[in-house]
């Protein structure tokens, strides 16, 4: 169990164009993160994209969370850097599975 981990890294396959993946992430990522995060307290999501590489920041439970995303023709890879103390309140393995499930649903 990843109770004390500080990073989530996942790669999700998709059958969309990279532009469509990015469009969907821009439109719906905040809602998907709210559904994945245990108390749904995601605020101030900011996304920055340069081609098919993106980064984001948001706050969750009063803590800053940041991450990176990279879209290829067949996958979306993302890494989320959780605050040092987040692992005490959140099982990072469960959070990773929940985030992956929400993003996978977004890309269907």
Image (cartoon, rainbow, N blue to C red):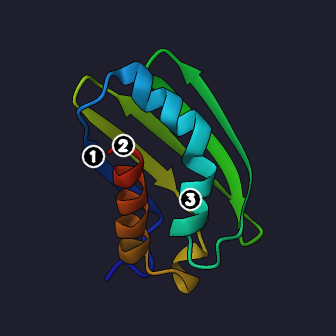
Horizontal side of 11 relative to 88 (left or right) equals left
Q: Check disc 3 and report the residue beneath it.
A: 33
Decide which of tag 2 and tag 1 comes sooner along the chain. 1
Depicted 40 relative to depicted 106: above or below: below
Mark 2 and mark 1: Cα distance apart in space: 9 Å
In front: 90, or 40? 40
Mark 1 and mark 3: Cα distance apart in space: 15 Å
Mark 2 vs mark 3: give the one in front: 2
Name which residue lies at 51% across and 28% down: 23
Instruction: Identify the image quadrant of residue 97.
Output: bottom left
Q: How many marks?
A: 3
Secondary structure at badge 1 equals strand
Q: Quadrant of the N terminus?
A: bottom left
Secondary structure at badge 3 equals helix
Secondary structure at badge 2 equals loop
Name which residue lies at 32% across and 45% down: 108
Q: Which mark is residue 107?
A: 2
Circles 2 and 1, Cβ within 8 Å, touching? The answer is: yes
Q: Check disc 1 and report the residue beneath it.
A: 12
Circles 1 and 3, Cβ within 8 Å, touching? The answer is: no
Depicted 84 relative to depicted 51: above or below: below
Depicted 46 relative to depicted 64: above or below: above
Q: Is residue 31 visible?
A: yes
């Amino acid at each position: 169990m990843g109770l004390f981990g500080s990073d989530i890294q996942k790669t999700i396959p998709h059958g969309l164009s990279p532009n469509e993946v990015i469009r969907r992430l821009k439109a719906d990522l905040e809602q998907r993160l709210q559904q994945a995060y245990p108390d749904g307290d995601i605020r101030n999501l900011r996304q920055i994209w340069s081609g098919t590489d993106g980064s984001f920041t948001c706050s969750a439970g009063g803590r800053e969370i940041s991450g990176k995303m990279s879209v290829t023709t067949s996958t979306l890879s993302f890494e989320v850097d959780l605050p040092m103390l987040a692992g005490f309140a959140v099982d990072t393995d469960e959070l990773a599975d929940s985030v992956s499930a929400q993003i996978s649903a977004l890309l269907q």
